[in-house]
Image: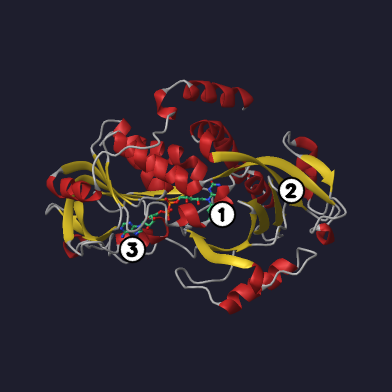
Amino acid sequence: RQWLEWREWFSFRFCSHSRFVDHAIVCSRDEAIHTMTKQHFDMLVIGGGATGSGIALEAVRRGLSVALIQSSDFSSGTSSRYPTCLLLQGGIGFRESGFRARSLRQFCLDDKAAIERPKYLQQTKHYVREYDVHVIQGATDNLFYFVASLFLRFISVRFLSPLSPFRKRGMTSLIYKDHLQQDSRVNVALITTATAAGAICANYCRVVSLVDDGAGKVSGATFLNRISGETCAVKADLVVNATGANCDFIHQLLPESMKNVENPGNKEKLGAPKVGFHLVLNKPVVEKGKGFIFPAQDGSVTFFLHYHGFTLAGIEDWDHEINEPLDNNQIQEMLSELNKFVCCTLTLDNVQSAWTGWRPIMKNHTSVRDFTIDQTIPGVISITGGAWSEYRLMAESLLDRIAPQ
Ligand SMILES: Cc1cc2nc3c(=O)[nH]c(=O)nc-3n(C[C@H](O)[C@H](O)[C@H](O)COP(=O)(O)OP(=O)(O)OC[C@H]3O[C@@H](n4cnc5c(N)ncnc54)[C@H](O)[C@@H]3O)c2cc1C
């Protein structure tokens, strides 16, 4: 595996695909929308998160003409809302889930990520910082972390300082190196690089319907320009649905003329999303360059990260409806949960901001980190799931899948 990692890293390090463009003013948003309505594209990508932007970039680099539509700001979906994805995660959590579920496949998923990670870090090194992540387990009560601390090279064991606010949860922590990335900036760099390479991208445009070519295939979409209020159409040979948690919504836009037994237009492919709750606290609970993670027996984690001078705290698997605004009671509930981990008391006065994020999970998924490519609707290809750090791998898989067509 080490050899594979080096080989991949060297070949990637010296190829032009590893470069990001920091700024590119090719045309204004209005000009981009005008071009979209006039030109016929090889590919229309719906969704300007990590997945959609990565696909647009990979597609233009392969010589396709590409249009990308994003309903609000670029990266305003899961790609910027799930702070654990700020950590590129040494894959330790996934190895643990695989270990616990006795699933070799899930355990080995991290190998794919481990090979991809050096490329990702090479590409985004100016947006990424190294971080010490402390995993706190009451001494060695978790067999996986005990075994991992013995065998995995990146883990070391330390005693917690007597002044540590997490002292009440354990005496020792296992430490591994991870990276904290500025996710939205990487996302915008992807869009900028794709634009510089020839993609036509526009934000504040929401796809409201799919267009039928009359021969049983989707041949484009109509979208609402959310700034001017106009509705426009864009034509493309292939529509890529990279809308994350909204993936089912795009399937439901199937034109009436294309609905049949196989594609009734109301099949839900997504299961319940994984919702995470996050607070930015003005109390300095964690030192600079450090993060603390508390894995629970059910596989979810609670974390505290040092974040631009503040503390970013979060709990995964929180029970909350998607898109519902948060109220003070819910924030208070989360604070009580977080107070179980720290010696000090966190109150509403410490909260600077709060938000939720969600990860789409396919009904037939085997691992949360797995991604799914679905081609049940002619002319539409949907890609859901995966990980931020694997956006390039996902784009490559999708483009390889459609290459023969
Ligand atoms: C709990 C959790 C932990 C994670 N941990 C990690 C990690 O440690 N490491 C890692 O690498 N990754 C991690 N990830 C994964 C990572 O967050 C996602 O893989 C990544 O954000 C990809 O998102 P996306 O582009 O598919 O979706 P999104 O970012 O949600 O993008 C979809 C976009 O489509 C747009 N859209 C929706 N409907 C329409 C429409 N009708 N018209 C136009 N646009 C539309 C939305 O506005 C949105 O911006 C984690 C995710 C979760 C949930």
Marks 1 and 3: which is nearer the front? 1
Horizontal and vertical percent position of residue 10: 52, 21
User: Label 2, on which residue?
Assistant: 134
Q: Is residue 282 left or right of residue 162?
A: left
Q: Find the residue positioned furthest to the bottom.
A: 329
Say whether marks 1 and 3 touch (CB < 8 Å). no
CA distance for labels 3 and 2: 39 Å
Please tell me whether mark 1 sits on a helix, a strand or a loop.
helix
In front here: 329 or 248? 329
Residue 402: in sight, yes or no? no
Which label sits on residue 249?
Answer: 3
Residue 78: give x, y in percent of width and height.
Answer: 47, 56
Q: Quadrant of residue 266?
A: bottom left
Looking at the image, do the residues carrying marks 3 and 2 touch, with CB atoms under 8 Å apart?
A: no
Location of the C terminus by quadrant is: top left
Q: Is residue 46 above or below residue 265?
A: above
Real-space Cα distance between discs 1 and 3?
Answer: 25 Å
- The amino acid type of the residue labelled 2 equals His
Q: Give how far across and how far down residue 236 sits, in percent.
A: 20, 46
Which of the 4 image quarters holds residue 192? Answer: top left
